[in-house]
Image (cartoon, rainbow, N blue to C red):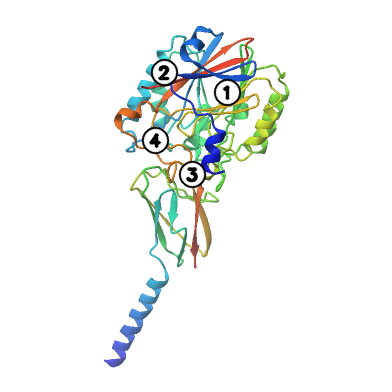
Amino acid sequence: MIRSLKTVTLVATLAFATLGEAAPPRVQIKEFKFVPAQLSVPVGTTVTWTNGDDEAHTVTAMDRAYTSTAMEHAESFAHRFNAPGTYTYFCALHPHMTATVVVR
Amino acid sequence: MDRRRFMQCMAWAGTGLVWAARGGVLSATTLDTAMAAGADFTFAQISDTHVGFGGDANRDAAGTLRESIDALNALDTRPAFVLHTGDLSHGQKAGAFDTLAESLKAVKTEKIFYIPGEHDVALDQGKEYLARYGADTYEGRGYRSFDYRGVHFVGLVNVLAYKPGVGGALGDEQLAWIRRDLEAQSASTPIVVFSHVPLWAVYPSWGWTTADGEQVITMLRRFGSVTVLNGHIHQVLQKVDGNVTFHSARSTAFPQPAPGAAPNPGPLKVEAGQLRQLLGVREVRYTEGSRALAVVERPLA
């Protein structure tokens, strides 16, 4: 019983540590910026972007491996990152908007 | 460049004023004076129609496009042709190019020349746009030049090499083509260059610049009369640099803030009564011999 409780606590602690370490896999587009500008996620994470601006924006890989459509206000786009690496993306409509996803 | 310095460099236009370059000297005249001067031909510019736009800044962009077409058709002189300086669509929404083509059938003119804005090409790097509008352009690349009654027109594409972190760009291949094209013209030929993103550095931190645009401006300096027309920034703005005069055009869909006047360049929300003063088209009048190209703004209200 005691051992079992300890196990539960350990699992809970690990889960908490993991959550505390990694930001939620969400990026807000606000005021012509991707927030956060750098997001760190484990392999296999699906990241979701939501446009909070009145202006249309895209989420487009620098190498064009993926792209959203032109997202209007409150529209979202999701992409799953399957391999570790540093992925830079930008808004194809406003290319001064750039950000990265680091996949561990 | 800070905002104050920027303002010092700019000549801001007032509604109803015409900037006319006569003998290389730019002067503002009233609308009536310019009209009375007569012209050999006129053409018109429409820009940033953003078909598919549905934001708060203009809930009826289809309606203001119709009004813009009415404004073109109400001109005293029928324009020989119309230049559309890009952002035909709002992010290539499905069917947007069809809708625009259908709407623009109502324009009373011989021909409409198009160049793309980033909204027309950003998603697929120009595939849809060039398939539709590339046919009579240089090798189907979207840029082209043509002559009309002694004036040489050059339509450029500065949104296909749109650079992350920079803004508009022409790219080396197009620059080489522009060099060849302009070298074939005599210095006395009036030149009209049109592009979507301004060729000059209007406000680089908002991407309102063409990274390699200065190279073209350098090529243009030997000509006696150069008029550069662009869209993209949804407002009337002028700059004079020697014999080169730059004119930014209004959109028919929604206005944008003056450079640096807002935290970002997003659509500018104004009171309903003010909106139509900030949207519209323009007429350009050419008179042979005077080297005059008079740019007449035609706001919707």
Subunit of mark 1? B
The answer to whether residue B169 is left or right of residue A76 is right
Q: Which residue is mark 3?
A: A94
Subunit of mark 3? A
Q: Is label 1 in contact with label 3 (beta carbons under 8 Å)?
A: no
Q: Which residue is mark 1?
A: B136
Q: Is label 2 in contact with label 4 (beta carbons under 8 Å)?
A: no
Could you give the CA–CA distance between mark 2 and mark 3, rounded to whole angstroms? 31 Å
Q: Do marks 1 and 3 share a subunit? A: no
Whole-percent x and y of residue A26?
A: 38, 59
Q: Quadrant of the N terminus of chain A?
A: bottom left
Query: Along the line of sight, which residue is nearer the eye, B195 or B229?
Result: B229
At label 1, the amino acid type is Asp
> Which of labels 2 and 3 is toward the front?
3
Subunit of mark 2? B
Could you give the CA–CA distance between mark 4 and mark 1, rounded to whole angstroms? 24 Å
> Which of labels 2 and 4 is toward the front?
2
- Return the disc, 4 or 1, that comes first in the chain's sequence: 4
Q: Which residue is mark 2?
A: B105
Query: Along the line of sight, which residue is nearer the eye, B255 or A17?
Result: B255
Q: Is label 2 in contact with label 1 (beta carbons under 8 Å)?
A: no
Whole-percent x and y of residue B268?
A: 38, 37
Q: Which residue is mark 4?
A: B94
Q: Do marks 2 and 1 share a subunit? A: yes
Could you give the CA–CA distance between mark 2 and mark 1, rounded to whole angstroms? 19 Å
**For numbered disc 4, what is the local secondary structure?**
loop
